[in-house]
């Protein structure tokens, strides 16, 4: 991986690994001939160069997908599922290799990277099972000698645009249900994490997936991503990323009458009531807030705590956070890895200064951790603010880094109101021993995911994943709900009366 040295009798050259496109079963250079470096966020090492594709590459990929999908849609769903079972087995076989790659190019600690690959394995097996459970419905007709039913049919060609923070898990959430339901794919991963994308496609290739069904187009959002949205033969865009980009996709896709499935982040909160198990709550806050260095759409960036236990929670939380070890995620003893790149590091630092200017009290962290490793990585100290008001920017806006804001409340009603008073609605959790509070929270927390006595992260692949408000546009990744994204409903009527029957007109008199 990365730079290799080739020698002969007279020269010594340095060759950089290039991560190219995969179109119609072949690995291809981008038509632009352009590449940009792929950087290890923990140490600044160059891992290789990733292709910067143009609209011409997207068009080539789409034409291959259109051709392949015409045949694939005719393959019985249980037969399509067999490919997914094979993908699952290959993912399991290559689990450690894939995890090491994720840590190298994305930065998350190796334990989390292994968990991410396991998520893709689980998704492969689950969606393979849906190949035999792609149920429609039968129902009685209002007319005699007539049969009525509904069936699922594929959308056609799906374009998926995936982020760097879960480079194989989110790709599995989108690609596997799309394939088992009979669609073909054009996939644009993040240019920050092209290596694991290439390895995932190689697994599809080794599984024997027919050529043209999955096409990888490496490149930027403004170039390759925009071309996917504009392409008339891409029927659906599945996107996970920022709210700003998702809005632009939805606006343009709406004008083109193109379907979209959007998952766009969160401002998630953990509610800690006065009867909570504080030790459990603190452990969960640390995992939810600083796991993946806070770079999860489900990360806990707010802790809404009852005033009676606020001080005690803060003291124990700060003590625990100060013991966290930062470093290269390949080291099994490291707790927190780097941010993805310099831009992300600068954004987090900017929000910390905004929080200070707003009057929040900094309890710990708040600085770039420049002395970690070789000093070239993008590390930020785990940061906690207290005395945060619900209307502050750090309490409202998605920071996407290791920053937690503590907000004090008087009771559960106020806690729920503060939780809901943000533009996102992805995940929330509550710590309490009171079953009455539990059920009120389940009813009133305005998020797509609710956890009881657990943090805001840890979604399981057989449940729907997604949120309310500006988190998305009503669709869900994972679970049976994902089938609704990648299929159309078709109503079918079979009239065996051998007469013309007119619905809503004939009285069917004896």
Image (spheres, rainbow, N blue to C red):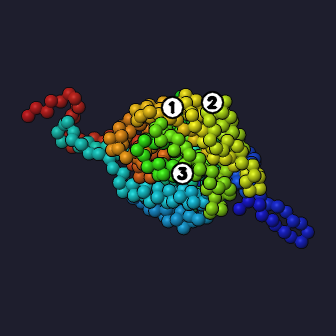
Mark 2 and mark 1: span between their CA atoms? 20 Å
Q: Residues within 10 Å of mark 1 (few under 14, many from 20)?
A: some
Residue 234 placed where, x, y %? 54, 41
Q: Secondary structure at mark 3?
A: helix
Decide: is 359 above or below 150: above
Task: Say which quarter of the image contains residue 111.
Answer: bottom right
Give the residue number, with chain letter if any, for mark 2: 359
Q: Residue 287 has which mark?
A: 3
The disc placed on residue 114 is: none
- Mark 2 or 1, closer to the camera: 2
Q: Is residue 341 visible?
A: no
Give the foreground label among 3 and 1: 3
Secondary structure state at the residue bearing disc 2: loop
Instruction: Out of 272 and 449, give the one closest to the viewer.
Output: 272
| Relative side of 446 to 496, left or right | right
The reply to whether residue 276 is visible in this rendering is: yes
Q: Is residue 147 left or right of residue 485?
A: left
Q: Residue at x 81, y 65 (%)?
A: 5
**Mark 2 / mark 3, whichever is N-terminal:** 3
Location of mark 1 (residue) = 422
Q: Report x, y in % for residue 445.
A: 41, 37
């Amino acid at each position: 991986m990365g730079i290799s040295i080739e020698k002969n009798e007279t020269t010594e050259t340095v060759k950089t690994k290039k991560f190219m496109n995969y179109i119609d079963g072949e690995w291809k250079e981008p038509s632009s001939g352009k590449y940009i470096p792929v950087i290890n966020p923990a140490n600044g090492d160059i891992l290789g160069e990733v292709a910067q594709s143009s609209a011409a590459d997207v068009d080539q990929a789409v034409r291959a997908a259109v051709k392949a999908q015409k045949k694939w849609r005719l393959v019985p769903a249980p037969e399509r599922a067999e490919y997914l079972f094979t993908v699952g087995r290959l993912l399991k076989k290559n689990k450690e290799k894939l995890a090491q790659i994720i840590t190298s190019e994305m930065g998350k600690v190796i334990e989390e990277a292994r968990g991410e690959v396991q998520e893709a394995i689980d998704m492969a097996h689950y969606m393979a099972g849906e190949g035999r459970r792609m149920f429609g419905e039968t129902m009685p007709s209002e007319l005699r000698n007539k049969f009525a039913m509904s069936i699922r049919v594929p959308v056609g060609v799906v374009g998926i645009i995936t982020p760097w923070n879960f480079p194989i898990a989110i790709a599995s959430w989108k690609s596997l249900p799309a394939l088992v339901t009979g669609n073909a794919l054009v996939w644009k991963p993040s240019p920050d994490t092209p290596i694991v994308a290439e390895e995932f496609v190689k697994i599809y290739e080794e599984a024997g997936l027919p050529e043209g069904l999955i096409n990888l187009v490496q490149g930027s959002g403004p170039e390759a991503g925009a071309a996917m949205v504009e392409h008339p033969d891409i029927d659906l865009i599945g996107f996970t990323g920022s709210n700003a980009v998702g809005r632009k996709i939805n606006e343009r896709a709406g004008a083109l009458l193109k379907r979209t499935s959007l998952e766009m982040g969160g401002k998630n909160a953990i509610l800690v009531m006065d009867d909570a198990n504080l030790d459990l709550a603190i452990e969960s806050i640390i995992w939810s807030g600083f796991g993946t260095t806070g770079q999860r759409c489900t990360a806990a960036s707010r802790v809404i705590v009852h005033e009676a236990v606020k001080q005690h929670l803060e003291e124990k939380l700060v003590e625990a956070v100060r013991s966290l070890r930062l470093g290269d995620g390949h080291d099994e003893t490291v707790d927190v890895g780097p941010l993805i790149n310099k831009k992300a590091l600068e954004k987090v630092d900017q929000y910390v200064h905004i929080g200070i200017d707003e009057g929040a009290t900094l309890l710990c962290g708040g600085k770039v951790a420049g002395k970690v490793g070789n000093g070239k990585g993008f590390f930020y100290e785990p940061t906690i603010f207290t005395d945060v008001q619900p209307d502050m920017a750090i309490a409202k806006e998605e920071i996407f880094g290791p920053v937690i804001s503590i907000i004090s409340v008087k009771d559960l009603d106020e806690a729920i109101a503060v939780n809901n008073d943000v533009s996102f609605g992805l995940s929330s959790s509550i710590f309490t021993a009171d079953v009455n509070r539990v059920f009120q929270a389940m009813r009133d927390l305005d998020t797509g995911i609710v956890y009881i006595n657990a943090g805001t992260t840890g979604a399981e692949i057989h449940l729907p994943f997604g949120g309310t408000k500006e988190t998305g546009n009503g669709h869900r990744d994972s679970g049976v709900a994902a089938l609704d994204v990648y299929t159309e409903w078709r109503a079918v009527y079979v009239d065996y009366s051998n007469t013309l029957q007119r619905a809503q007109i004939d009285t069917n008199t004896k």
